[in-house]
Image (tube, helix red, strand yellow):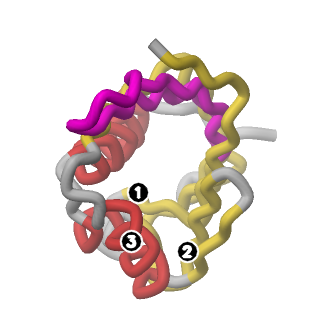
Amino acid sequence: MNDPVTHDELQSIERLFSDFAWFADRSDAEGLANLFLPDGVLSVRGQESAGSDNIAADCRKRFAAADRKTRHMWSNLRVEMPSADTARTTAVQLTFETSDDDTPARLRVNDVVDELRKAASGEWRFVSRHIRCEMALAF
């Protein structure tokens, strides 16, 4: 049986999702990695990084292209709470990506599957985040 999702819990989880997009769009690898528990896992298109240090290092590699710009949006959030301090979520994430060259802008429609845990601070953190591209479009 799942615990009910309170309005406050939902707002906190939504903030976690928005922070992920914010840090990703501003190339803030450390800020993004800090959204995960120390032993958290980030999987993007099958490439997995385990632990905050490895997540930050992978993000720094992604963010290294100076002319790359992204914007992330998410929707269709579904939350299940097996207990008061754990949650399972699914959402759809849109990733818009462009560069300063003449390459057409790209859009990826991703399914996102997360395991969350409430940290000692009371804030929600990612235990794992799996981002899987379901569609890719070029403009």
Mark sitting earlier along the chain (1/3): 3
Per the image, the residue denoted by label 2 is: 40
By secondary structure, the bulk of the magenta-drawn segment is best described as: strand
Indicate left or right for 97 with 22 as reference.
right
Q: Secondary structure at mark 1?
A: strand
Q: Name the residue rendered at 52%, 18% in the picture.
A: 138
Per the image, the residue denoted by label 3 is: 61
Q: Secondary structure at mark 2?
A: strand
| Distance (Cα) linking label 1 and label 2 | 12 Å
Q: Name the residue rendered at 24%, 52% in the picture.
A: 23
Q: Quadrant of the C terminus?
A: top left
Nearer the viewer's eye, disc 1 or disc 3? 3
Check if residue 112 falls in the magenta segment: yes
Magenta region: 89-113
Mark sitting earlier along the chain (3/2): 2
* Circle 3 residues within 10 Å: few <14, some 14–19, many ≥20: few
Residue 16 vs residue 23, the one in the foreground: 23
Q: Position of residue 1 (x, y in %)?
A: 81, 40
| Distance (Cα) linking label 1 and label 3 | 26 Å
Q: Name the residue rendered at 28%, 46% in the picture.
A: 68
